[in-house]
Image (cartoon, grey):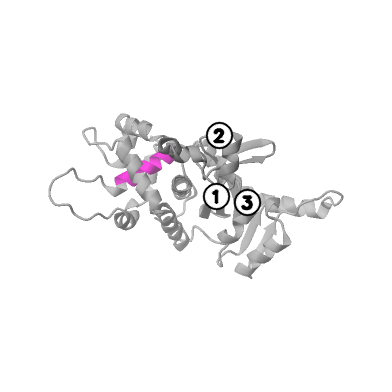
Amino acid sequence: MGDPLEKISQVVDFEMFRPLLNGVFKREGKGQGGRPAFDHILMFKILLLQQWYCMADDKTEYQINDRLSFQRFLGLTLGSKVPDAKTIWAFRESLGKNGAEKTLFSLFAEQMEHKGIITRSGSIVDASFVEAPRQRNNRDENERIKSGEIPEEWKESPHKLRQKDIDAHWTKKNNEKHYGYKNHVKVDKTSKLIVTYSVTDASVHDSREIVGLVEEQDQELYADSAYVGRELHKEICKKNKNIKLKIHEKGYRNHPLTEEQKNSNREKSRIRARVEHVFGHMTQSMSGLIVRSIGKYRASCVVGLQNLAYNLSRYRYIRLSVGVKSHA
């Protein structure tokens, strides 16, 4: 009947993630007694459901109990015990503290490259804002946070400090204010899968992360005019001397782009625009690009899971709609 979760289950073998998850959540035995822990793959799938359907922990617990499609995806029955909101939070918290979300993401990306779905024939780099809950701080508090300090009154009130995100920052783009973080991604131009990513606060300029995203396997690099700069291009070529840079040229006051440069930019845009499809899917279909957490390591965990959830969803489309015969 078109259940997308059932289709994902058909093409993705989630057992590939079990050894890694077991290693992250390995616990020493405490003897007999106590309730057994929930299966790690079950909990991991729950975190993916949260990203696909943009759900908070309490809503996730309710929806799993309410929706048969979620229960089928998780391998549960009507009589099964469902993890509560606090258990879901604790699992994600442990995952984030270990930075395991990036390893899980890389594991799947490596599988896609091994099977030839990620081709490395061309890579597109771009960044998108990830909105976080806005902080209501006064001007003095904001100045202290920008300088890397914590306001004294917050230190005296631990409960208040726990609700303050000192890692997220404000920025302004096209007269729009954004607060939170940035998701810097490198996307394979052929498959539109995310190959790698990094997470920063929203004030970090896009160009500062591009060198870290470039790898020796990349053959061509597409990016918009935010990534112009002779020194920056030298840094990129120093990391990968064989890479072909196809970065948009930028016009300046009294030095507008020539017609030849405009035509060149239009040709590059035909490929570069594919990264906008990635962010569009995450925004429209997944209602994503937001975090409800406090602190960078939690935001990094959520963003990493968003990127992995997108890749799994995209892989489902490639397998079932385009007809690629590989199997994860």
Which residue is under mark 2?
A: 137
In the image, taking residue 142 as reference, residue 59 lies left or right, namely left
Residue 309 in the image, given as x and y percentages of width and height: 44, 46
Please state which of residues 3 and 162 is positioned toward the viewer in this rendering: 162
Question: Taking 297 as reference, is 5 above or below it?
Answer: above
Please state which of residues 286 and 151 is positioned toward the viewer in this rendering: 151
Mark 2 and mark 3 lie on one chain; the one further toward the N terminus is 2
* Numbered badge on residue 206: 3
Question: Taking 102 as reference, is 130 above or below it?
Answer: above
* Magenta stretch: helix, strand or loop mostly: helix
Please state which of residues 90 and 197 is positioned toward the viewer in this rendering: 90
- Name the kind of residue labelled 3 in the image: Asp
Residue 116: within the magenta? no
Furthest toward the left, the residue is 32
Residue 92 in the image, given as x and y percentages of width and height: 37, 45
Mark 2 and mark 1 lie on one chain; the one further toward the N terminus is 2
The answer, for residue 67, to whether it is visible in the render is: no
- Name the kind of residue labelled 2 in the image: Asn
* Numbered badge on residue 249: none
Measure how far apart labels 2 and 1 are at the Cα level: 21 Å
Residue 194 in the image, given as x and y percentages of width and height: 52, 52
Query: What residue appears at the point 24 percent right and 32 percent down from the top-left corner?
Result: 78
Secondary structure, mark 3, is helix
Which residue is under mark 1?
A: 200
Q: Quadrant of residue 209?
A: bottom right
